[in-house]
Amino acid sequence: MSQINQPYGTEEVNAKVISIHVPKTAGTTFKKVLRQIYHPEEIFFDYPHRGDLRHKMLTNPKPGVKVIHGHFPGDKYDNKFPEYRKIIWLRDPIKRLISLYFFWKTWQILVESDAENLAPVKESNLTFREFAEKPEMQNLIKSKFVQGQKLTDFYFVGIQEFFSQDLHELKVMLNWPEYELETQNTNPYPEYQLLLEEVLSNQQILNQVSAINYKDIELYQEALSIREKRRKISQIQYYTQDYSRKQKSIQKKRKINPLLTWGSIDRIIIKNQVLRLSGWVASLDAGILEGFKVSIGNQQFSFFDKTLNIPSPDVEKVHPSLSGSGNARFRIKVLLNQQQINQLQHSLIALIPQFQDGEGIVILKVLAPLLPPPEEKYIKTTNSDGSGQFFRTSFKLLGDLIQRLGLQPTDHILDVGCNIGTVAYGLVHYLQPSGRYEGFDVVENFIIWTKKEITNRKPNFNFNWHNIHHPLYNPTGKISANNFIFPYPDASFNCVCISHLFTHLQGYEICHYLDEIYRVLQSGGRCLLICFLVNSESEELIGKGKSSQQLIYEIEDGFTIDINLPEKGIGFSENILLKWIEERGFKILEKSYGSWCGRTSSIKEDLLVLEKNL
């Protein structure tokens, strides 16, 4: 699989840092930034759950490591690595303690959900005040992380409440390259906000908790003072309003070229307000699964219990060539409130597997689709064996749009050659009412079905039939594809999807459609393009009889499976198609090869991600 754009972390960064991750101070978000800036082999994570691994940097330093990050005392590596620059992030101690309490309480409920013969009083029943009075929770930052050191012993003390500004300052100080800052973890539980308001409005509780955490409060006040002094003498240009808007725009356009992975969610159960997910994930060469990003109904969850790398002889039997296929199964438990449970039936569940080298391909699932499946006679036109494969194809395309294009729930998307609504079927579970979908096709019966079953349920999904001539799908059509003008204003879409059409069009028609796509896309808008790219590798595999598409008959600029009816299946010389794309002003962000010709890949056809130049 080929990736066009270079990932973050490819520039040489010389700064060596030790990052002390105080829980609930944006340390996880900071870790994601470090992973963009440094190569994976340059980072050592020191977390207690990794057991003896966390002592190896002291006893046997790993060559090439430039970052040590994790939960450990600030002076742990002073003697061994005095040249490293120490960084710590702090937060208002009371708010941090409230956040930690909610995280801890959620964790206890998840643990207790499987336990039997519990003690009369469950740990999860502790009130915030009782939690704060636990000896191990008092002055935790001072006693566990700062200990006998002074804040002036640290190279940089950041404040979580000013995370983006302070991170920018640190970037300049360390001469870091650009990074993409994800939205910091937000708590998806309304109960958390209620708890926050309840505690902060109760002066008695505030006084009591402040009294027993006076050392952490003094430390935080000192950190604020250090920050104020640092900013007064610094020559760094800080965030302006325009820069902040630019950063938000970049974040919205965030796109991941996922690693080559396979997987599925096999089972979903709800018990005692706990959502239980089980399935499997394996990769071609990304190594062992490290974790997941979990979102449900466009809401990301950072609090969940996971069990990874469970033995999976069944997966290994089917996928013996995949790395870790013998231990590929996982279990996840997520605590939901009643409102979330009520909305769960049609909510999109998304798992993004995390590996040391990056993210795997997103796995999507819904308990019950919002729409009925198309009739079998229509499903067959999509080259699907049945409704099950149709569902998988639809949600696979949705995952590509979200992960590779950065599609947002409020975006406007055009589906060129929408067929029986293959893209729209999954998209109805993601696109919000303020978003907009437009699709068109040359087969009238397809549009009749999609209008009846989709538009009637989702008015922001619009379908149109155009009587465009196509030798295979609409032989009596009156409009030439080469003369068809898309009936949409200039720059009216954020995204365009072409899921199959370019495998059934001649070269001159593709060139015209690329012109129209460029016209209707907004500046910076993106296009997902599915096609067959003919190159030396695919030609060799076709010659060996390994391809599902025998593109052996040469036509102008391309190859077909049927010389008498070329539109049955057309592929183009890779260099020629890429030239057409670039001539029209597109930038090619991603080029990923599929399995159609017999190569190993978790996608079927070849895939391109295009961007209209700014």
Image (tube, rainbow, N blue to C red):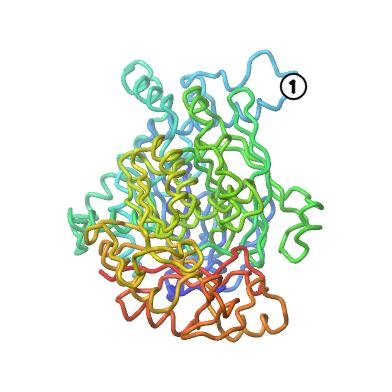
Counting from the top left corner in percent of width and height, residue 528 is at 43, 63
* Residue at the disc numbered 1: 116
Query: In the rendered view, would you say 288 is above or below 555?
Result: above
| Residue 143 sits above or below residue 288 on the image | above
Q: Nearer the viewer, residue 363 or 143?
A: 363
Image location (x, y in percent) of residue 185: 42, 43
In this view, the residue in front, 601 or 420, is 420
Q: Which quarter of the picture shows residue 317?
A: bottom right
Which quadrant would residue 286 be assigned to in this image?
Answer: bottom right
User: In this rendering, does residue 83 appear at all?
Assistant: no
Where the C terminus falls, by quadrant?
Answer: bottom left
Q: In the image shown, does 470 or 255 lie closer to the viewer? A: 470
Residue type at numbered disc 1? Glu
Residue shown at 36% from the left, 40% from the top: 432
Against 121, residue 114 (above or below) is: below
In this view, the residue farthest toward the top is: 120
Percent coordinates x, y for residue 73 in the rendering: 52, 49
Looking at the rendered structure, the secondary structure element under dot 1 is loop
Name which residue lies at 63% across and 51% down. 389
Residue 492 x, y percent position in the rendering:
25, 56
- What residue is rendered at 69% in x and 84% in y? 543
User: What crowding class fits label 1: few (fewer than 14 Cα within 10 Å), some (14-19), or many (20 or more)?
Assistant: few
Q: Quadrant of the N terminus?
A: bottom right
User: Picture quarter containing residue 196?
Assistant: top left
What count of labels does the image hold? 1
**Relative to 419, residue 1 above or below:** below
